[in-house]
Amino acid sequence: MPSMYDAIIVGGGINGGSIAYSLAKRGKKVLLLEKDRLGSKSSNAAAGMLAAQAELNEDGPLFQLAKKSRAMFPLLAEEIKELSGIDIELVNKGMYKIALSEEEEHQYKQIIDIQRQTGELAEWITGEEVRRREPSLSEAITGAVYIEKDGQVSAPKLTLGFLKAAAALGVEIKEYTEVLSFHVEKGKIAGVKTNSGNFESETVIVAGGAWSQKILSEADVKLKTYPVKGECFSVLTHQPLINGTIFSHGCYLVPKKGGRLLVGATVKPNTFDQTVTVDGIGSLMEKAKKIVPSIVNAEWEKAWAGIRPQTSDSLPYLGEHPNYKGLFIATGHFRNGILLSPITGEMISNLIDGESTPIDLTAFRIDRHVRTIV
């Protein structure tokens, strides 16, 4: 007879791990299913930026969600370290959103005004001041928005940290277990059917990233999501080229421990092809050289690609499906999956328990686009 769980999570990436961890902290009996290895897709490919202000240019539901999630990381880092022994490498050295033209400078100064009106810290610094703080940066930079609160983590370690911490709290994890279909009784979720057998629960959460739509199609559910390929590369130096994260249009540079520098990321929509291309990496190299000219002397390390889930309105889906009671969905985070992971786990857990959420999730509701496949 199949085991009965309080919740079954489909997807062993960053958000599946966060939801598992949050539910486990509430004493739930949880099963997490991953069709491949844990954290083997976009969660492992991400640079780990917590770019709540650098990434988002206007106040709105996503900005509020991002700020709330960013504030959760210091405590989360301590909890994960205590439970799993994993250091998620949280770094709070600020972020520079650099301008390479007068047009960008004008645009970014307007963004500063908007963010200050929401109570956030952001300041404009001149090109000279940017280079004083980060001497390796190019003379082509006219100035930058300095964002003190935006930071970074190790995305692979955060993902593994969530999952190991969840396991320490009793979550059962099964790799290489693919969900083939959902078991539905009278419009209510009753469990899942997998290549390794059936599992019962009245609560199922789909958090499969860019592959969520394939899973949901088995329940005749169609979301307006599409995959977006992102290519990145990394280099090594004996001395760090930069200390703070550099964010620019079409390219970011994220310094990691040991003189490692991550450069990303291309944006190629509507493909699941994870091939790393000369065109993609070549374009990133040209942009990176324009920002940090001395990167040409760095030692090449490696290149990789990840597939990110995007939605038609650039807002993630967070909530319960309107037609299938007990089916919850958390996908469509695009480039903010790492940043939004703590709040995603908390919000989905609140919804499952029938609790109010500290942030209005109306903008992220499932039924804003969802339709049933006929």
Image: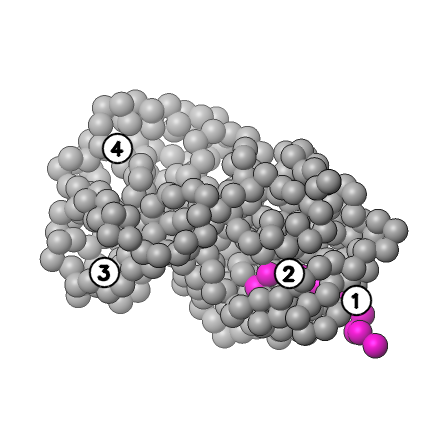
- The residue lying at 53 percent from left, 59 percent from top is 14
Tag 1–tag 2 contact (CB < 8 Å): no
Mark 3 lies on residue: 235
- The residue lying at 33 percent from left, 24 percent from top is 107
* On-image quarter of the N terminus: bottom right
Q: Earlier in the sequence, mark 4 or mark 1?
A: 4
Q: Amino acid at mark 1?
A: Glu
Q: Earlier in the sequence, mark 1 or mark 2?
A: 2
Q: Position of residue 148 (x, y in %)?
A: 38, 43
Q: Which mark is residue 10?
A: 2
Marks 3 and 1, how far apart at CA? 47 Å
Q: Which mark is residue 99?
A: 4
User: Could you say which is closer to the camera, residue 371 or residue 325?
Assistant: 371
Mark 1 lies on residue: 200
| Circle nearer the viewer, 2 or 3 | 2
Q: Residues within 10 Å of mark 4 (few under 14, many from 20)?
A: many
Work out whether 366 lies above or below 307: above
Q: Earlier in the sequence, mark 3 or mark 1?
A: 1
Q: Amino acid at mark 4?
A: Ala
* On-image quarter of the C terminus: top right
Tag 4–tag 1 contact (CB < 8 Å): no
